[in-house]
Image (tube, rainbow, N blue to C red):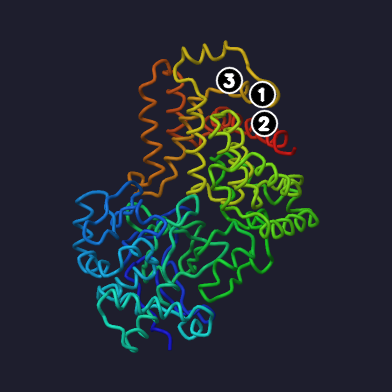
Amino acid sequence: MPPPIPSSPFPAVEVRANPSKGRSLHATTSFAPGAVILATQPLACLPALSHLASRCSHCFELGTPRACTRCRSAYYCDAACQRAAWQSVHRLECKALQRVPAERRGQLPTPVRLLMQVLLVEGIQAGVDSLEGHVAARRTRPGWRDVELMAMAACSYAGKGADEATVRKAAEQLCKIQTNAFNWTDEDFTEACVFIQPTLAMMNHSCLPNAMIQFIDGRIVLRAESKLEAGDEIEISYTDVTMPLPKRRQAIDSYMFRCQCLRCRDNLNIYQACSTSSNLDLNGLSLSPEVSKVSQLPIITNSAISKRITTAVDDLSGIIRTDEFNNGDIKLLTLRERFQACRELVAVGAWAAPPVPQLLAAISNYFVNKEDYTSAIAIQSLVAIECTPYRYPAPFHPSRVKELVHLASLLSNTAPHTAEQMAQSSASQLTGGGTNSKIQEALREIDQVSTYQMLLLLAKSLAPVGFGAKFKLSLLASERLDELKQLPGREKELSLIERWDADPHSEWSKSFFQFAVIDPIHRLASLGEELVNQEFSR
C-alpha cells in the first residue's frame, strides 16, 4: 500500500493524488518563466562519490576541503562548516563511518551513506518513510541482492544490528532513496551532489519540463522554466533531456516508469522539441534571437530531413560515447574521426543534434589547450549560436548563462585591455592565413572589451531573483566586471554600455546590442563553421 498523500509545507505548491502517476506537485499561483517557485534546505545531502574529496560536506562548495580527522570520510572547507555539520548530522554519523574499513571509506556508495543518515537521524527517517519506493517491483528486478547487501552494510555500520526485520526495513528505505533522491548536476551535467527533499520528490519527470532545480549556496531552488498557472503540474527532468531517446530511457529506468511525454512518444529530435517551447520569444535579449523562428527551419518543415536527423542521432548514440570528450588529452585524429562520423548531421545544419555540441566543445577545448584562443572562440561562438539555444530554449537556463561567461573568458585571452593597446593591435600585421587569418581580422574589428563587458552584464542579469549574490556564475561575472573598472581610456564606451544596461529593451538598446554583441558573435560563429569544416573534414 503506497504512503498517504503528504501535505506541502510550502504555500506555493501542493501535492495531489494522480491517477496515472501516483502523486504530483502543483503550483498554487502563477509564475513567470525564470521565477523562483520556492527555495529550501534539503532534508539530507551528500557530495556525489566522485566529488567526495572536492566538495564541502556541509555547504557543498567546490574547492580543496579538509577531511574530518576522525572518520576521514567527510570534508569541510573551514571550521565553521565542520561545526555546523557536527551539530546537524555528523556527530551521529562520524562514529558509524569509523566502523567502515579505512580502505573502503572513499568508495562507500552515496545511497549507502544516505541510508546511514536515515538510520541515525529520526527527522531524516520520518521524511524518507513518507516516500514511495516501488519495493515490490524492485524485488523482481536483477540487483535486488545488491540492495539487501547495501542495506545490511548500512545497518552494521550504523550499529543497528543485522536481524532480518531491521535489514528488510532498511532495504525498503534504500529503495525510497534510490527512487526519490535528486542527483544534482552542475552546468556540465557532471553529478555533484545527491539530496533528498520529500515535497520536491513529489515532482514527476518530463523530457519537456516546465521547471528546473538549481542548487545555490546549499539551498534547493525550484524555478519555473516556462510560464505556470495556478493548478498546473510542476514537472522537472530527472536526466539530461538533450540526450537521444534510448539514452534517456536508460537513464530513467531506475525510477521504475516509462516516460510518456510528447518528446518520447513522437521521438522528437532536438529542433522539434525546441519548437514546442513557450520560451522562444524570450530570446530577444540573447545571442540567438533567431531561435524564435526554429519552426520555420527546413530541419522542421522538411519531414525527410527531420527523419534523417533522428535516425543519425540514434545511430551515433551507439557508436560515440560523449564522455570521451571530457578527456582533456583527446587527440586531433580522434576529433577528426568523430567529426567525420557526424557529417550527415553537419551536412543538414543540425549542429545542435547530439553528439555534435559535445564534439564542438571538445574541439574548442583542444584549441584552448594549444593556447590557440582565436580558433577556440570561433568554435565556441558556433556552439553559442547554433547549439546551446536550441538545446535549452530558455535564455536563463544555467547552461545558457554559463555559455555567456565562457565566451567572455575566451575573449579575455584575445582582447587588448586599454585604448592604447587597441590602437597598437589595429596597426599590427596579420599572421597566418586562411580561416585563422579571417578570425584574427574579425576580432581586430570588434571592440572586444565592450563585448566582453556586455556578455558578463547579461549573464549577471539572468541569475535567479534573490540569489544573484550567491549564484556562482553571477558572482564570477561580477568579479570580472569589477576588474574592468580599472581600465583607463574607456569613458565613452562605458557610458554607452551603462545606457544599454539601464534599459536593455529600448529600441536604441536593441540596436546597440545587435551591433556590439550579436553581429560580432555571429560573424565569429560563421568563421567557426568554416574552420571546423576546413580542419576536421580531412
Most extreme residue toward the right, as rendered? Answer: 304
Say if mark 1 contacts mark 2, CB within 8 Å: yes
Side of 333 relative to 404 (left or right)? right
| Label 1 – label 2 distance at C-alpha | 7 Å
Residue at the disc numbered 3 = 444
Q: Which mark is residue 438?
A: 1
Kind of element beneath mark 3: helix
Q: Quadrant of residue 111?
A: bottom left
Residue at point 29% right, 59% down?
A: 74
Q: Which part of the image, by quadrant, shows the N terminus? A: bottom left
| Label 3 – label 2 distance at C-alpha | 14 Å
Q: Amino acid at mark 2?
A: Leu
Q: Amino acid at mark 3?
A: Arg
Position in image of residue 318 (x %, y %): 67, 60
Residue at the disc numbered 2 = 527
Position in image of residue 401 (x %, y %): 48, 44
